[in-house]
Amino acid sequence: MRTQTLCYIKNNGLFKRVLKGAKIAFIFSALIILSSCKSALLPSFSSQQQPAIPNYENVTAWAVLPDAYPENLKHWQTSTTALNADVFYIYPTLNIEKKDLRWNVPVTDSIQNDKVIDKAVYFQASAFLNAGKLYVPYYRQAHLRSYALFEKGGKEALNLAYSDVKEAFKTYLEKYNNGRPIIIASHSQGTTHAIRLLKDFFDGKPLQNQLVAAYLPGIAIKKNEFEHLKMMTDPSQTGGFVSWNTFKKNYYPKTYDKWFKGAEVSNPIDWDNTNDSERSDHKGFLFTNDKLYAKALQVYVKDGILWTSRPHFPYRLLVLGKKRYHEGDINLFWEDIRENAGLRVESFLKNQMISKNKD
């Protein structure tokens, strides 16, 4: 153990309950704001015993497999037809507790695993449920502090987390995929890993031919991040990626110039990177009471970030004063994403059929 000064990235009300009896949700609370520094005993990454390596041949290493959907996920399963694509989803950082000194979380941690199912899967992965068979591996996620302490153990923690994601994806390819079209979906830390996954397996490689789309919100993606994968600017386009980071209209985060300016940004309502969208175009966000609210948001595409109006819905006072909508990157546009993912799969399969007929 060694004493290390921690500048915590603090979450103000992350995953809080906003309605009596409502599920804990990914919703608009102010997130990732710098807090005061304090001293704490934090073991160095190298001195801390790391959690056991998961074995993705075992079904227990997966939060979701097509033949083992959790009950809460079935709530959103509306498609009765055969699904002709796969969705590989990588969840965001869920371990945010200051008192938790672990750099990485074991995949056997029941508390963290419950968060994966009840928060990430229910409010994020569910948007892709009817676009393809869903695969969600547990992985040894890095603690939130890994980003603030990137040069002091965070890099190693994130590398460890990615090693699990990579191994899970290799197992998925070998055991489950069978040449089917693939959607990569992620958020926040999940997107950190998804970027590396796309570079290792898809970018300019044969597997790129199976890529329907990569949905990569929650982390700024600089232009030319990929060599061959391109930003998609049409709702039916396939083979590339979309990405956005959501903030309140007229708000620029303090880290804007360093992290966001010049980044790729999609409009997750009309799927263009140049247009703004009116409230009338918004198809619906998923709130903590399990209801979808349509025509609730007006969005504006800025340089590297996405601005949104304050959500127009019965509980809008609950988000009064919120400026960072990071947690809502997916569920704010839940129905928009759901419909778009299905459209891109249809487009991919249609183009695939046209190509086969030409041959």
Image (spheres, rainbow, N blue to C red):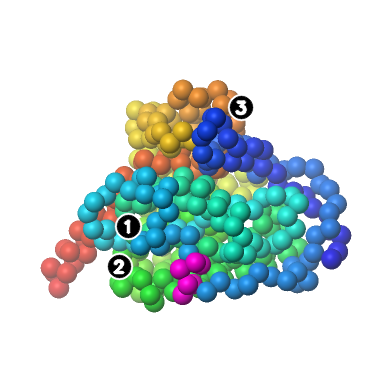
Q: Position of residue 95 (x, y in %)?
A: 64, 53
Query: Foreground: 147 or 177?
Result: 177
Q: Is residue 262 left or right of residue 270?
A: right
Q: Tell whether label 2 touches label 1 (CB within 8 Å).
A: yes
| Crowding at mark 3 (Cα within 10 Å: few <14, some 14-19, many 20+) | few
| Crowding at mark 2 (Cα within 10 Å: few <14, some 14-19, many 20+) | some
Q: Tell whether label 2 touches label 3 (CB within 8 Å).
A: no
Q: Residue at (36%, 40%) from the top-left corner?
A: 335
Q: Which residue is mark 2?
A: 180
Secondary element at tag 2: loop
Which mark is on residue 321? 3
* Residue sticking out furthest to the left: 357
Which mark is on residue 95? none
Amino acid at pointer 2: Arg
Q: Residue at (75%, 58%) from the top-left corner?
A: 101
Amino acid at pointer 3: Gly
Of the two numbered discs 3 and 2 on the same chain, state the one appearing first in sequence. Answer: 2
Secondary element at tag 1: loop
Q: Which residue is mark 1?
A: 132
Query: Foreground: 262 or 235?
Result: 235
- Does residue 295 sit above or below 118 in this rendering? above
Secondary element at tag 3: loop
Q: Is residue 17 magenta?
A: no
Magenta segment, which residues?
A: 56-61
- Does residue 282 sit above or below 160 in this rendering? above
> How far is the residue under mark 1 from the one under mark 2?
10 Å
Query: Foreground: 350 or 48?
Result: 48
Q: Position of residue 22 (x, y in %)?
A: 51, 34
Of the two numbered discs 1 and 2 on the same chain, state the one appearing first in sequence. Answer: 1
- Does residue 93 sit above or below 252 in this rendering? below
